[in-house]
Image (cartoon, helix red, strand yellow):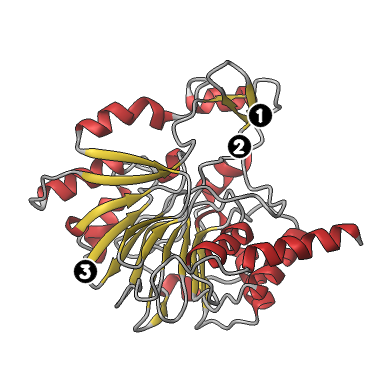
């Protein structure tokens, strides 16, 4: 009973509107989001264990995350005829390499288009904190073997190199407007106990102390529209329910028009997936294009729990898009993926299962 009362109070606190400080006319028009990196791909595109998406509005382009391998995003953008040259802002969900490794190549493509000015990059507070592998964890030795070192925050090491390319990092601690109708959430309060983070990595504080790495900088991107917010997750390390609760509390208190990206449910148990589905339905989720670390089976279970159909909820394959004009636009591959998930990027999934 006590737990139920606490959960109810937390829900009230999170959904009580505090979005009044945002102007009603801060709305994105003609919004479209196209997946440039995820685990499913077909045709001339390439799949990988990673995520990236282009967010286009009437007058602006923002890139969300930059994929796992150096050239995946730029190559997929070419294949899909998505012009990266319009990007002026980049939002990174968190420091993990499967969301940041393509940054330098993206910048090179933008420079090749003729744009020579600075590029603003928005990251959550804590993004550059050093991380080390917990050698007391059963996966510790394997982690060192895979990464080649006990330090795993490569973004800390690459920061100076990327700044030399004209990137200006903004470490934010709260919801921050990027451009008209487009927001970065900043770090997400962990109100609900969604445990979506690696258990074998530690944060290393300046005083030398270490604490479990809950990926505190994990953030999302939100597009405010007349039909409700479009929300992008990288891996959802803060939890999809925590994320959408924050969006409704702080950015736009409307039913969620669409949720896209990774939800980190590929190895979640049935109870967790069912609970997530119930909560997402309570938050008014109308469209779902889950990909990356969500997993095929959890995606189908969520679709069922939400009461959505194939025109409203699909796997977010490379090239899939969601727009105000057309809604969910899956690729042919995403349409054909069955419950067995035969086309899923198995090698990357196996890699992640061993480490996360």
Mark found first going from the N terminus, 3 or 1 = 3
Q: Mark 1 and 2 residues: CB-CB less than 8 Å, in contact?
A: yes
346 w.r.t. 96: above or below: below
Distance in Å between CA atoms under marks 3 and 1: 46 Å
Q: Position of residue 156 (x, y in %)?
A: 40, 28
Earlier residue among tags 1 and 2? 1
Quickly name the residue at label 1: 139
> Pointer 2: what residue?
355
| Residue 273 in view, yes or no | no
Label 3 element class: loop
Left or right of 111 on screen, residue 142: right
The secondary structure type at the circle numbered 1 is loop
Nearer to the camera, 142 or 98: 98
Q: Residues within 10 Å of mark 1 (few under 14, many from 20)?
A: some
Q: Where does label 3 land, which residue? A: 59
Q: Earlier in the sequence, mark 2 or mark 3?
A: 3
Instruction: Name the residue rendered at 60%, 26% in the picture.
Output: 142
């Amino acid at each position: 009973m006590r737990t139920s009362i606490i959960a109810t109070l937390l829900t009230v606190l999170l959904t009580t509107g505090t979005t009044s400080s945002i102007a009603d006319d801060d709305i994105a028009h003609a919004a479209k989001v196209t997946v440039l990196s995820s685990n499913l791909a077909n045709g001339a595109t390439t799949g990988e264990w990673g995520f990236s998406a282009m967010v286009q509005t009437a007058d602006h382009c923002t890139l969300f995350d930059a994929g796992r391998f150096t050239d995946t995003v730029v190559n997929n953008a070419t294949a899909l005829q998505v012009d990266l040259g319009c990007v002026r802002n980049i939002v990174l969900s968190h420091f993990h390499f499967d969301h940041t490794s393509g940054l330098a190549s993206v910048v090179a493509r933008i420079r090749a288009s003729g744009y020579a000015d600075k590029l603003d990059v928005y990251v959550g507070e804590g993004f550059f904190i050093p991380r080390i592998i917990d050698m007391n964890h059963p996966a510790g030795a394997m982690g060192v073997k895979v990464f080649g070192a006990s330090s795993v925050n490569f973004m800390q090491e690459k920061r100076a190199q990327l700044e030399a390319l004209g990137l200006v990092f903004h470490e934010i601690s709260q919801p921050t407007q990027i451009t008209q109708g487009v927001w970065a959430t900043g770090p997400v309060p962990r109100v609900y106990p969604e445990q979506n983070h690696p258990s074998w990595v530690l944060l290393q504080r300046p005083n030398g102390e270490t604490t479990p790495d809950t990926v505190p900088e994990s953030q999302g991107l939100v597009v405010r529209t007349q039909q409700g917010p479009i929300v992008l997750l990288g891996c959802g390390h803060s939890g999809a329910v925590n994320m959408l609760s924050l969006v409704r509390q702080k950015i736009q208190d409307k039913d969620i028009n669409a949720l896209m990206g990774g939800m980190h449910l590929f190895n979640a148990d049935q109870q967790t997936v069912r609970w997530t589905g119930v909560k997402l339905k309570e938050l008014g989720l109308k469209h779902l294009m889950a990909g990356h670390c969500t997993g095929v089976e959890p995606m189908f279970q969520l679709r069922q729990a939400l009461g959505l159909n194939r025109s409203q909820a699909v796997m977010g394959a490379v090239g899939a898009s969601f727009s105000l004009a057309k809604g969910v636009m899956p690729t042919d591959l995403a349409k054909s993926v069955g419950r067995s998930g035969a086309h899923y990027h198995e090698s990357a999934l196996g890699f992640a299962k061993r480490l996360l």
